[in-house]
Image: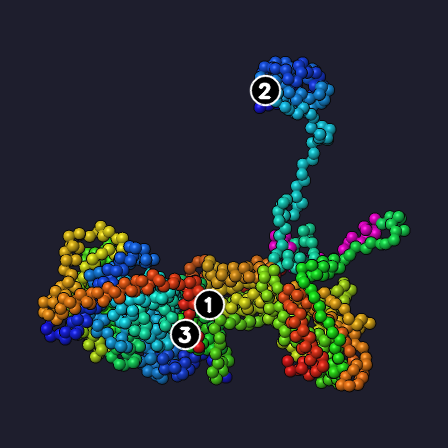
Amino acid sequence: MKHEIVMPKAGLTNTEGIISSWALESGAQVKKGDVIGDIENEKSTIPLTSPADGFLAGLAEPGEEFKVGAVIGYVVDSAGEAVDAAAPATSPAPDKAVSAPVPAPAASPVVAAGARKRISPYAKKLAESRGVDYAQLPGSGPGGSVVAADIMKALETAPVAAAPAAQAVSAEAAQAEYTDTPATTMRKSIARNLQASLQNTAQASASAEFDVTALMQFKDAMKDMAEALDNRITLNEILSYIVVKLAAKHPCLNSVLTDAGMIRQYRRVALSFALANEKGLITPVVREADRMSLNQFSQEMKRLVALGRDNALELSDLQGGTITISNLGMYPVDAFTPIVNPPQAAIFGFGRTVTKAVYVNGSFEKREMMHISLAFDHRSMDGSDAGEVFKSLKAFVEQPQLLLLY
Amino acid sequence: MMNYDPSLLKKLYRNYLALREAEKLMVEIYYTGKVPGHIHSGEGEEATMAAVLELMREGDYFSGHHRVLASTYLTGVPFRQIFAEIMGKRTGTARGVSGCNHTCDLSKGGLGTSSSLGCDTGVAVGAAYTCKLRGDGSLAIKEYGDATSSRGPVHEGMVLAASWELPVLFVSTNNTFGISGDSRELLPTKHPTADRAQGYGMPSEVAQGNDILEIYEKAKKLMDYIRETGKPAVLETMNYRWRGHFEGDLCAYRDEKEAEAAMKSDGLAKFEKELLAKKIMTKKEVEAMKKEIAEELADAVKFGEESPAPTMDDVHTMMLAEEN
Amino acid sequence: MAVKTYAQAVNEAIREEMRRDKHVVLFGEDVAKHGGIFQATKGLLEEFGGARVKDTPIAEAAIVGTAIGAAATGLRPIAEIMYGDFLLVAYHEVFHMAAKWRFMHGDEFKIPMVIRSAQGSAFGAACEHSNCVEPLFIHSPGLTIISPTNAYDVKGLLKSAIRSNNPVLFLEHKQFYKTKMEVPDEEYLIPIGVAETKREGKDCTVVAVGLMVGRALEAADILSREGIEVEVIDPRTIAPMDYNAIYNSVAKTHRLVVAEESNLTGGLGAEISARVMENAFFELDAPVGRVAGLDVPIPYNVELEVQVVPSVEKIVAAVKTACNK
């Protein structure tokens, strides 16, 4: 048991004192009330008395300044009791020690210090899937909560960081071997999603070169159909429609493995496709595509593209896709492996059409050939499933009339 | 008695005996923990059902109450199924999920019973409506007690049966007590069911609960009337409840001496004595019958013990019938 | 096809089913000679005779009990309980017996019965003759409850109810009997347990029941002029409810308001919002709004009654709140 010897208060305004000297050494036996040393303060020197019976121990060095009430030594019950020497606390000098009180929370009526950020469940889901940090986002919902509209607004707002960062570039950096430009929110979101896709799924792919001669003839025929349909159906639209038909025919393309261990089979096929606009890359969705004829589908794609280019799409037109198409056929790209777009399970990648000499029925013929790849989540779909899909894909591109019949 | 066909007398005796032995066994298995629910013993009151159900024909319907649960045995439901239901097993009449008051089989005319006594009066009336449309002289029997007769739905059922002229036999096995309530004190008339029949325009009879032949005669008279006219009628039998309302009821509310006296005038013992005296049956025949019934009952309990319990799957699948 | 009233549609449904199957019978207070107090059963006694179409004394418990007994023994009864409020006189018979008779007595029992009842406020009918009773019965497992809101739906659903092998509580709102609509003459059935989207929209889902369906559609028109597109879902069958239709709609609009005439506490909105919270939580951008009758007995004075029964304006306000406008 040790009793603390504390720096005594010499007067009403006294805040600190110095141990002038000890009258006895550590280990000396004392009784309560015995004088054991002298304390010096700004006004005078006063005697220090022992607070208890026992043995002096852990006495601080004379000359040290202590705050009033601080421990400067101990009186212990038994002679041999080990005790560390008292020492002044390592706090800043007294006149700076009293820190300013924690400022009251900002005048926001809702978020008290330490309270959770209020955000609607849907807005939170949206924020997480689009990579928006909502912690500091102002909310326009009830009670200042964040709602979906606030997330969408954040996605559209170009980051302000560009200016300060540019200012921070010193002369030295200007001569450096690289320049840093802040990634846009959208870019960060894409980065996050695609990396997550590869990390959280078991992606595999299958690809083949298909004879699309018949498909190209079908596409050419659309020129003649344009007047009757009041719509010119494009190759991209036809390829997208094939993806829809495949997803409707092969449920594995339209099903995902959920975190809860369920195989979620979407009831309708909703096709996501990539569209570049001034903001970056967006993926409009043709909903209930499996219910549409080719003409209806084509018109809906055109509608989405037009709105998408003007950045006028509704939130609902950007969500709920169950499968994606990626078409690089307008570039000199033969084949590529796209990345599955979470939370979907499959994505098709179409390359360019190339005229080749192909050995068919005993001789070389001029055929239109195209590489098509399928990247899929192997957790819910197997290679043999992909094989079946490719069988259907082959049938569709070689006999496009099947698009009418399926 | 000499006017009766001996085979009918033997049958009535067997009915009475079988129900008595079943009642006794139910109490026994309750005390050995084989019954999850309550047993409301009808020991001493079996004559009414023993007689009335003997008059049931194919096409007739029957709804009983919470005593003499094995009454449905007389409609052709095996003891095995009855006891399995009471023991809460899947081989019971209702897969064991329903329990004590629900020991019927529709194919044998069993309509079922509501455990909220008297509320099922309408069900018998509805069955009688079906009988009327069939026009084949079949009828519905609704059995209930004296205390139950106060319930609203009982009166509504009687009003409707009278209004539509439906072939229902309302049978009240008056055993003097509700739970602790003595019907002689609580209710305004001596025969709470039969005395009201006139108010519904129905003929009625009162019989002694321990005189199986009196019950049989009066029941036959009323049931013949119902089959002929298609109109309802009321039979009330006067009994005294031998045991508690439920097992464990100490009956502190009634006169022990009166109870003892009632139990001494056991209608089954009387009937047996008379049959033996008039040489309708021999002692050997009686012993053989007792043995046969005892074996049947022992087999039923064993069957119940060995049967599996129902599962939640049974609960989920029993609620709705298949749609077409 | 012709324009018919709801009452006529009910009449046609019963008539067609009684012609089709001689086991179908009809009884209740004032249904035979008088043809029903809303004239829904007019002419049926004349066509089918007094054995199959019968008036009863005022004895609701017996009416329901009789329907159960008749159903169990081979008939297909349609029992009328004049007012929904009077179902409570036979609450035990409906809640425990009709719904559970098969459960209690075994698989060989089938209870193919329909209880038809007129419910809801009717301008001055007061607190014991104005209630909407769905919430009192959804708590009974085994009972199907249907509340059709127009003449087309009522005919198709009543026929399905009569053909069902299980007990059905069929609730007709008093204010609907005189409403008119095109109803086909040819036979058609509407399946039980399937909701109908009566109006498509992308901004907010309103699930409305009974009288509130029409009011929700009116509210939707008002809101459309302000740029808010409401999707109105009429469940039609209250139990079992087509929750998937509701979840799918909420996944589209992210906002839900439930509108019912029955009072708030323990109403349908309470059950629906709990289910949506459980199954579509991450689709909700706003709390589920409930528009319901006030938790008071319905007053006798009509000026007060209309303040208790939810109005179009209340639905508009709830949608706007959900849309954060």
The three-letter code of the residue at mark 2 reads: Ser
What separation in Å lies between label 1 and label 2 (alpha carbons)?
A: 82 Å
Pinpoint residue A342: horizontal percent, then vertical percent.
67, 63
Q: Give neighbour class at mark 3: few <14, some 14-19, many 20+ (Cα, 10 Å).
A: many
Q: Residues within 10 Å of mark 2 (few under 14, many from 20)?
A: some
Residue position marked by numbered label 1 in the rendering: C239
Disc 2 is attached to a residue of which chain? A
Residue pictured at 69% horizontal, 61% vertical = A197
Instruction: Tell me which residue sits at (20%, 61%) in the image.
Output: B44
Q: Which residue is denoted by mark 2 in the rendering?
A: A78
Callout 2 secondary element: loop
Residue drawn 80% across the image and 54% down it: A162
Can residue C12 be seen here? The reply is: yes
The amino acid type, in three-letter code, at marker 1 is Ala
**For residue C81, what is the image quadrant?**
bottom left
Q: Position of residue B203 (x, y in %)?
A: 18, 72
| Closer to the eye: label 1 or 2 | 2
Quickly name the residue at label 3. C165
In the rendered image, the vertical position of residue A27 relative to residue C117, given as above or below: above
